[in-house]
Amino acid sequence: MNDLSADWPAPAKINRFLHITGRRPDGYHTLQTLFQFAEPIDWLDFTVTADGVIRREGGMPGLAPTADLAVRAAGVLQSRARVAAGVRIHIRKGIPAGGGLGGGSSDAATTLVALNVLWGCGLASATLEELGLELGADVPVFVRGQSVWAEGIGEQLTPMDADRPWLVVLDPGVSVTTGAVFNDPKLTRHTERITMSRFNALALRNDCEATVRRLHPPVAAAIDALSAYGPTRLTGTGGCLFAWFGDRALAERAKKGVSAYGTAWVSRASNRSPLLGRLKTS
């Protein structure tokens, strides 16, 4: 494997807040959220092949290749750009599944960005974002690689440089089904829309949290434990959560304090994905 095809990062995302502002006639929910990037990270290696076949190695145990967003992303790009070559994708997972950290979407975005280079497609980033939207609402965020304020059903993206606190990201080991959360009759669905200038992490919330706490007591216990150290939010529909701090020492202390509640990482919120840095070296 040559250097060009190795070590492409696919970072996790966090939702600094998540407000559900309505529900459309087609059933999709409208929302407002702020995406930033964080650890943990998946790592992808790509080996271009001449046979036109897309193969996957590693990845999430039990997930069929045809259901893997990275494999689907490669197929979408191959079809759009009329690429004759194939690829072998090796995925080293660091992001837990079903945690609200966007691991599958991030893998898909990294695949689009990397293979656009390795296959010589030459597509613009905006085109890659369009292809990503076919795979999932979060994929364009990861393709763009910059923190964004998202609205609509997640497709209306506005760049935003937010504060970059130290984080403890905690995985209580609970896989949450997004559909179960959004179909819950008790879910808050009509939060008032706000403007970007009114962003205040302490004053905002994740509208999914009450439902997830009720459906998944281990997540509720993890939120309560981490909240003892700093302000805490669910990310996405969970089950992962995070707290933020003014310095790393406080974050490290909190990580030790919640070790009984799951796997934790200390990270720093980022407004720029490491994927952009890797792209510059390709």
Image (cartoon, grey):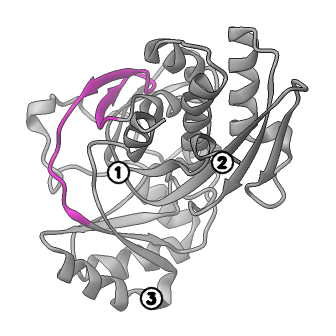
Query: Alpha-carbon distance for marks 3 and 2?
Result: 31 Å
Q: Earlier in the sequence, mark 1 or mark 2?
A: 2
- Can residue 74 be seen in this snapshot? yes
Per the image, the residue denoted by label 2 is: 45
Cα distance between the residues tagged 3 and 1: 23 Å
Q: Which residue is mark 3?
A: 259
Q: Amino acid at mark 2?
A: Asp
In this view, the residue farthest toward the front is: 2
Residue at 72 percent across and 28 percent down: it is 74
Q: Position of residue 246 (x, y in %)?
A: 12, 69
Is label 1 in contact with label 2 (beta carbons under 8 Å)? no
The mark lying in front, picked from 3 and 1, is 3
Q: Which mark is residue 206?
A: 1
Magenta range: 146-166
Q: Vertically, is 272 above or below 153?
A: below
Front position in the image: 273 or 116: 116
Q: Which mark is residue 278?
A: none
- Tell me what residue is drawn at x 57 percent, y 46 percent: 184
Spatial CA distance of label 1 from label 2 is 34 Å
